[in-house]
Amino acid sequence: MDELEREKLQQERLVAALEDAGVRWGQVADCGPVSGGTFGTVFGVRTTDGERIVVKLAPSSDRPVLEYERGILGTEAWYLRTARERTGVPVATVLAVSAQDEGRPGDHLVTGYCPGKPWNELQQEVGPEDRDHLRRELGGHVARMHALDGAEGFGYPALSLGPLRPSWRETFLAMVDSVLGDAARFDVTLPRPAKEIREVLTAESGSLDEVTVPRLVHWDLWDGNILAELAPQGAPDAGRPRITALIDAERALWGDPVAEFVSLGLYHDITRDEPFWEGYRAAGGTVTFDAAARNRMALYRAHLYLIMWVEAVPRKFDAGHLAWLERDIYRPLGEMIDAWAGGRGPMEHVWPRE
């Protein structure tokens, strides 16, 4: 498929997605791509009556995806509906979502627009007091998500890696196998042989048996997926910052809440984020970072690093992004595997170097 054909198909898919949400193309006043995500394509739409809409299109059928990504727009729709109905956590409203088709990703997801800026941008505009206020609010939202249970097992709701499983250890190792399989499929060079990575992670997986209740985990709450704003004039909290939405929940799964703190602590040691923990505990969240929990944290970080490194090939990231990945993801992952293999344990990699 050449680029002209691809653009034509994308336009057709965009029109179909809007129609699925009850919006005709003639009602569109403005439409343009939204940056930030790496899975598929995102458009921001404004209608003639002023409504703002977000449309996510999965990669076209000739674009490769990782195994776990099959159906993840459906996962995000499920997450948004579940979080809105059962927790009150601020998320976008689902307007339309297409069904998964024969193992391919769902074709589109259409949601309402969420105001605000990513956390990493807004935090530069607020003082320490307001920053702490936002972190407490965020901690409360995360705890309310983690309170949700009731799943029949662990795993991805889209069932991209098979049915939900009764064992978290079995589920996690299947997730590792999946991304290692993707590495072979896309001919990705790993920092250590795939067999060694699998053997080391398996040998360290005993601590996962402590997790017996599947909980709702967003799984991608890095700073860019947390939106916040200063409340507008006329609002009861005018001028105060507030969390407006937790976005991009395509990776959501039933799993271990401790896994959440990998992305939440992607750039800092979240164990020192006292305002966050104040909000988390006030909303009923509990976590103890003992040796077993820290070992699980390291396992989850290794898995996330695998995903971030392997997806770079089908995503075709530019040279600058690849250089960052090699420095901050590829090399630390190799160091973690070596530390485990040498019997030391990669505790220095539970949290990133600050």
Image: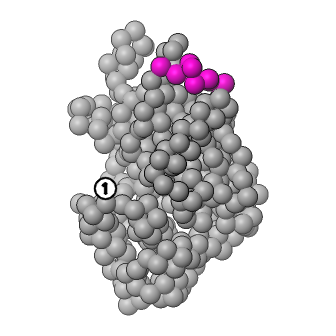
Q: Is residue 93 left or right of residue 315?
A: right
Q: Residues within 10 Å of mark 1 (few under 14, many from 20)?
A: some
Q: Is residue 6 above or below residue 129?
A: below
Q: Nearer the viewer, residue 130 or 100?
A: 100
Q: Nearer the viewer, residue 111 or 119?
A: 111
Report the residue at 38% width, 90% height from top: 342
Q: What is the quadrant of residue 322 in the picture?
A: bottom left
Residue 7 in percent (x, y) is at 49, 44
Report the residue at 52% width, 79% height from top: 184
Q: Is residue 305 above or below residue 104?
A: below
Residue 161 in percent (x, y) is at 67, 66
Q: Is residue 86 above or below residue 214?
A: above
Q: Is residue 307 magenta?
A: no
Q: Is residue 120 left or right of residue 165?
A: left
Report the residue at 76% width, 57% height from top: 152
User: Element under label 1?
Assistant: loop
- Which region of the structure is painted magenta? 21-29
Report the residue at 46% width, 78% height from top: 187
- Three-letter amino acid code of the residue under disc 1: His
Instruction: Say which residue label 1 marks.
Output: 268
Residue 137 in percent (x, y) is at 43, 35
Q: Quadrant of the C terminus?
A: bottom left
Residue at the bottom extreme?
Answer: 342
Confirm whether residue 243 shows in the render. Answer: no
